[in-house]
């Protein structure tokens, strides 16, 4: 059932346009039938008099038959079913009622909390220095692949989830650690929050290998399985990236950013990863995927980003 719903939501434009085409074909078939029948039509058993007008469908039927396809096409363009409908908001992996701070992990496309971060969230939960933090590792791979969601609607959906769960009222501060395109989601999330509220819940944004100026399109599609539409968004100079940059610069109040990159990242260049960042650091090793997989708390991949999270 869920797969069918995902299919209908993802393809609602094509389905409605197809329905419009079907109505037009039925209307055309009706005209053809009337034309053919009228050639040998009879009225009360008699042939039509020579020169009599051929019968045609009532004007009301014709009008409705033309209006319905137009409405279907307009609805298809508007996509009336939100792509985030009936999606379940992510759950906290640590939920202590006395904690007043929240640390959020946001992975990139085709990732998931377990595979992307591996031990990272668990290391935080075992670190006594961060006992005052609840932890949320967001996972959304199914939503994206089945419904073709892109960055902006995903961020708005997360913002709505955080509001409905009371995060903005419950926590005095929210820190985000984001990987790859998760950094773009995080920025759009902060923008959505500032558009709808006057509070400032987000304290710090840590972005690891995020493509602020785009990425190696071929490498990204191959490594992460990104769809064509997302590849277009992440092409250097794309309208999406330009709008995100302008919206981010337009925020009067925004949290500080700390970005991490590596010369061994073959997907996101150092220049792209550190663009629009307040501070940054280059790892001497590790590629795009390995940068977020610390093995223990002494690992640079843990110690460096967590040094920016204030207990």
Image (spheres, helix red, strand yellow):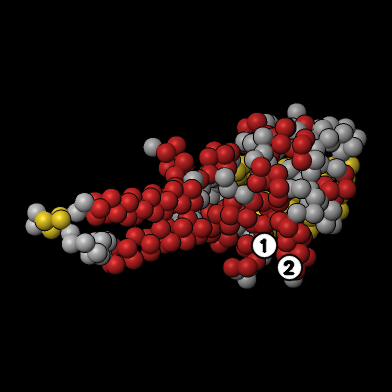
Examine the rendered structure and indicate whether residue 235 appears above or below residue 294: below
Examine the rendered structure and indicate whether residue 253 appears above or below residue 297: below
Q: What residue does disc 2 label?
A: 251
> Residue, x 51% and y 58% (percent of image)?
77
Examine the rendered structure and indicate whether residue 275 appears above or below residue 131: below
Residue 87 visible in image: no
Query: Residue 71 falls in which quadrant of the image?
Result: bottom left
Spot the residue most to the top: 295
Q: Secondary structure at mark 2?
A: loop
Q: What residue does disc 1 label?
A: 191
> Horizontal and vertical percent for residue 198?
62, 71
The answer to whether residue 219 is left or right of residue 166 is: right
> Horizontal and vertical percent for residue 69?
41, 58
Give yes or no for contact between labels 2 and 1 (Cβ–Cβ under 8 Å). Answer: yes
> Horizontal and vertical percent for residue 143?
54, 42
> Horizontal and vertical percent for residue 58?
26, 65
């Amino acid at each position: 059932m869920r797969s069918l719903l995902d299919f209908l939501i993802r393809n609602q434009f094509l389905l409605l346009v197809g329905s419009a085409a079907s109505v037009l074909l039925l209307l055309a078939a009706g005209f053809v039938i009337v034309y053919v029948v009228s050639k040998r039509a009879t009225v009360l058993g008699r042939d039509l008099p020579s020169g009599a007008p051929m019968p045609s469908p009532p004007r009301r039927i014709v009008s409705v038959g033309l209006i319905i396809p137009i409405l279907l096409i307009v609805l298809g363009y508007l996509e009336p079913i939100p792509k985030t409908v009936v999606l379940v908001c992510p759950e906290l992996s640590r939920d202590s009622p006395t904690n007043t701070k929240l640390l959020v992990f946001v992975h990139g496309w085709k990732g998931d909390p377990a595979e992307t971060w591996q031990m990272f969230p668990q290391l935080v939960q075992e670190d006594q220095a961060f006992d005052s933090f609840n932890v949320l590792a967001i996972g959304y791979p199914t939503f994206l692949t089945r419904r073709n969601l892109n960055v902006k609607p995903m961020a708005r959906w997360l913002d709505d989830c955080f509001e409905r769960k009371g995060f903005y009222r419950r926590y005095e501060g929210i820190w985000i650690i984001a990987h790859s395109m998760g950094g773009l989601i995080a920025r759009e999330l902060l923008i959505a929050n500032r558009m709808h509220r006057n509070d400032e819940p987000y304290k710090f944004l840590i972005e690891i290998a995020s493509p602020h100026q785009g990425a190696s399109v071929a490498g990204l599609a191959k490594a992460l399985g990104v769809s064509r539409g997302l590849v277009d968004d992440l092409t250097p100079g794309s309208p999406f990236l330009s709008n995100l940059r302008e919206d981010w610069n337009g925020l009067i109040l925004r949290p500080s950013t700390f970005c991490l990159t590596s010369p061994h990242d073959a997907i996101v260049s150092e220049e792209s990863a550190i663009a629009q960042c307040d501070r940054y650091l280059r790892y001497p090793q590790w590629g795009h995927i390995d940068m977020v997989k610390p093995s223990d708390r002494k690992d640079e991949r843990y110690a460096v980003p967590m040094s920016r999270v204030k207990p």
